[in-house]
DNA sequence: GAAGTGATTTCGTCTATACGAAATTATCGA
DNA sequence: TCGATAATTTCGTATAGACGAAATCACTTC
């Protein structure tokens, strides 16, 4: 008799629609903060009316992809999490492939991947990943889930919360806003860059940080888009 | 003053939906025979109910993408043709890229491209095309429209209509059916192959044809999926 | 504990796309 | 010219996903 084995994640019977995949991905992301994803936060993230989100969340819950306590927020079930990670893998492999192989500018890859992630087959994504040597991180430093839904969920501190006087390495930058991404690129704040936080003005003020030997002042909004690990 | 210039095809204000792109592509294809695309032919091609096609055709006509004479059939307008060729270019560039660069099997590229063609941006398609050296034909031998909607519309005869005793070159094979494609591949009937038609049984019977030094018998259905140009 | 405020849900509605059943039109053969 | 048959359209309806307006709930503040 074959030994017992965890059932591997399997493609769902009815493939998920693009909107559904977008909801699940957004909920996964919001949940990373620890709290359930609220209707309003989802509506803002997806630029939809809260009423629309309310309806969709109820539908997804009835399909077993979410647990939803009305007025409290939504959490992914195990199934929902698997689906979200499948989409996240597609997204991040696509970002990596487009940037590395096809030379798509790093502030454009997010938007392009956002469309393609709903259309590419799993085996195509695997081919792309293999062509890249199965990378563990995408061009923005975000970890790429494996085929089996394993992903590094370490939450690094943002540059805005990083203790003054400390050195660290940029681990990731948010890929959501291309303008922001271009700005961070100009500041050399890319994954792998070494930084040294010199000072932070009070009341959410600007932060003085050494990047590549240059002292920069960066605002709190941009700082929150950059995640740092302390240097050993 | 700058010299007068044809207005280049421009992305439509409201991007077309995936179903609309599929209809336009199918109508373009059916129209290549010379006659307008009929409702039933479209329904079969798209595996939809004729009633559904009827409704959609009326809508597309009201949007100026088609001319539709009820009970007679539909033809693309100039706008419709441009849109169809944009989709066709995406499809064929994707097929070429997937097969050539990513090693997706010959008989799978069609299905994969069918999905991706609705999601990939024009500039991504152009990047892929450039990476391939702007090929003129896709892996099945179908001509790839240029960015400006220029395409070779030469209609070659099918192997089923090819005169007995003549030599020719396989120009293209239909990409629609993966099983058929695998079969034709086994017979070495790929674009570029030299063939010599030896005999054809009457009443739509099998055809004797030399391919790569081997005499093959192939049925009329498969023969109609292969297009040939006479050798000079 | 009551009131107010902001978040959330409910309700009625809209659009795009699809369907089956029934009605209509075109065409071919007698 | 008259049907018969096949193709096509019309009609009523369904589903997914979205919206705004109005109702409801939760939490803070008095």
Image: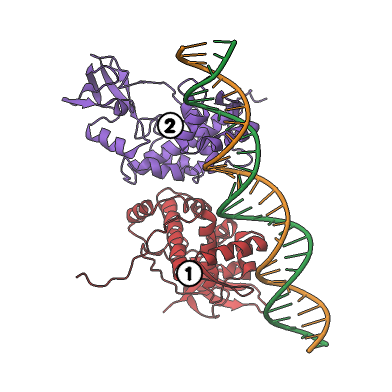
Chain colours: A red, B purple, C orange, D green
Residue at coordinates 46% horizontally, 61% vertically from top-left?
Answer: A88
Which quadrant of the figure contains the C terminus of chain B?
top left
Q: Quadrant of residue A161?
A: bottom right
Q: Which mark is residue B144?
A: 2
Rendering coords of residue A52 (x, y %): 64, 60
Residue at coordinates 48% horizontally, 70% vertically from top-left?
Answer: A77
**Near-viewer residue (D6 or A152):** D6
Seen in the picture, residue B36 relative to A98 is either above or below; the reply is above
Residue at coordinates 52% horizontally, 23% vertically from top-left?
Answer: B36
**Near-viewer residue (B23 or A88):** B23
Q: Is residue A75 left or right of residue B143?
A: right
Q: Is residue A71 left or right of residue D7?
A: right
Q: Could you tell me which chain the residue with mark 2 belongs to? A: B
Seen in the picture, residue A69 relative to D30 is either above or below; the reply is above
Rendering coords of residue A97 (x, y %): 41, 53
Rendering coords of residue A153 (x, y %): 44, 72
Instruction: Tell me the distance, in whole angstroms, between the alpha carbons under discs 1 and 2.
Output: 44 Å
SS at mark 2? loop
- Residue corresponding to mark 1: A170
Tag 1: Cα neighbours inside 10 Å, few (<14), some, or many (≥20)? many
Seen in the picture, residue B208 relative to B148 is either above or below; the reply is above
SS at mark 1? strand
Which quadrant of the figure contains the N terminus of chain B?
top right
Q: Quadrant of residue B213?
A: top left
Q: How many marks?
A: 2
Rendering coords of residue A28 (x, y %): 51, 68
Seen in the picture, residue A220 relative to B121 is either above or below; the reply is below
Q: Quadrant of residue A159?
A: bottom right
Q: Could you tell me which chain the residue with mark 1 belongs to? A: A
């Amino acid at each position: 008799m074959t030994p017992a084995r965890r059932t591997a994640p399997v493609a769902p019977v009815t493939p998920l629609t693009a909107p559904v995949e977008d909801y699940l991905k957004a909920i996964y992301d919001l949940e990373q903060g620890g709290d359930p994803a609220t209707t309003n936060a989802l509506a803002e993230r997806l630029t939809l009316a809260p009423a629309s989100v309310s309806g969709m969340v109820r539908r997804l819950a009835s399909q077993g992809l979410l647990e939803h306590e009305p007025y409290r927020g939504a959490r992914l079930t195990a199934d929902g999490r698997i689906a979200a990670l499948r989409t996240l893998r597609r997204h991040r492999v696509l970002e990596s492939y487009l940037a590395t192989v096809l030379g798509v500018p790093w502030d454009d890859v997010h938007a392009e991947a956002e469309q393609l992630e709903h259309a590419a087959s799993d085996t195509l994504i695997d081919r792309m990943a293999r062509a890249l040597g199965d990378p563990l991180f995408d061009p923005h430093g975000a970890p790429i889930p494996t085929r089996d839904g394993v992903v590094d969920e370490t939450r690094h501190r943002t540059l805005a919360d990083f203790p003054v006087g400390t050195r660290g390495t940029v681990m990731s930058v948010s890929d959501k806003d291309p303008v922001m991404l271009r700005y961070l690129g100009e500041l050399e704040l890319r994954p792998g860059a070494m930084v040294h936080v010199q000072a932070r003005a009070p009341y959410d003020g600007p932060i003085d940080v050494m990047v590549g030997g240059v002292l920069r002042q960066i605002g709190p909004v941009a700082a929150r888009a950059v995640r740092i690990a302390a240097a050993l």
